[in-house]
Amino acid sequence: MNLIFTKMHGAGNDFIVIDAINQSVRLTPAQCRFLADRRFGIGADQILVVEKADRTDVDFRYRIFNADGSEVEQCGNGARAFVKFVTEKGLATQRRITVSTLAGVIALQLEDDGNVTVNMGAPILEPEKVPFDTSGLRGKHEGEDTLWPLYLEPQPGREGATTYISVVSMGNPHAVQVVKDVDTAPVALEGPLIEQHRRFPARVNAGFMQILDRNTVRLRVYERGAGETLACGTGACAAVVAGIRRGRLDSPVRVEARGGVLQIAWAGEGQPVMMSGPAVSVYEGRIDMPIV
């Protein structure tokens, strides 16, 4: 199969975007892993597939595959790349579009300055719906949030330790902890331990947030199925929600990721999270796909 693709990124979180409306596309997990491989394929954190609408109240179907081949519910930075792609390719003429994902429907707006604003919907705050298993745990309260203890097993050269996390779903699960300095935070060590922790049956994205002031944070995220990325849109949303609920942040919040800056606004429980940031097309190409 000869596949036409576009390489894009949102604040350094990079994607392979595929038009499955004008070409026949059926990706296997092995093919997704091949495409995402930075040595033998194209290289990307996620693969985004643009499909015809699967329901009457949306413009497109938006599918997301992680670098490990797993299909996931949501990707905020990818949503911005999605709307930039469909408008640049003439698949949509309007500047506001709605798309269906595994997590539900989201609305995307291409702004006059080229940035994209995404209505990410209201966060899910009930642990069992994230999902997160709280059985036998006693959380501690900070503001309106509950911080849950998460025991991380011993590793070579390191004893077991307990970290306190906020659990939030933005259509996909997130565990957010506050750290003193993201540059020295143990993302590479703790990230995979949290991602695959038994208390998260669907695995989880692990966020490490440093609060600079009430409207500014720095953030690193170890993403489920992708490892640490230069930016994570849903991770930025989850971190801001956690910080506001803890009483440490005020909306709107500037989120400084390693690959760029996102703006997140949230008016409180039951209200949607609004995310704004860049989306950039890098290049287009064709690749011969292995039959696997």
Image (spheres, rainbow, N blue to C red):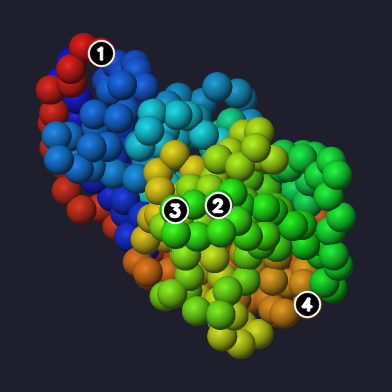
Q: Report which residue position mark 1 lands on.
A: 292
The image quarter in which residue 22 lies? top left
Residue drawn at x 78%, y 77% as measured from the top left: 247
Query: Along the polypeptide, which appears first: circle 3 or circle 1?
Result: 3
Which percent across, then down, holds residue 134?
Answer: 81, 44
Q: Which residue is mark 4?
A: 247
Q: Amino acid at mark 4?
A: Gly
**Residue 114 seen anywhere in this rendered image of the structure:** no
Q: Nearer the viewer, mark 2 or mark 1?
A: 2
Q: Which mark is residue 156?
A: 3
Residue visible at 63% across and 65% down in the picture:
177
- Residue 178 against residue 97 in the figure, above or below: below
The residue type indicated by label 2 comes to Pro
Tell me the crowding category of disc 2: few under 14, some 14 to 19, or many 20 or more residues within 10 angstroms, Cα based. few
Residue receiving disc 2: 154
134 with respect to 150 (left or right): right
* Vertical relation: 30 (above or below) 61: above
Q: CA distance from mark 3 to mark 4?
A: 36 Å
Q: CA distance from mark 3 to mark 1?
A: 36 Å
Q: Nearer the viewer, residue 107 or 47?
A: 47
Q: Amino acid at mark 1?
A: Val
> What is the CA distance from the residue labelled 3 to the residue labelled 2?
7 Å
Pick the quarter of the image with the C terminus: top left
For numbered disc 2, what is the local secondary structure? loop
Mark 3, mark 1: which one is toward the viewer? 3
Q: Is residue 156 visible?
A: yes
Secondary structure of the residue carrying tag 4 is: loop
Q: Relative to 86, is 108 on the left or the right?
A: right
Expressed as whole percent of the image width and height from the top left, the position of residue 13 reads 36, 55
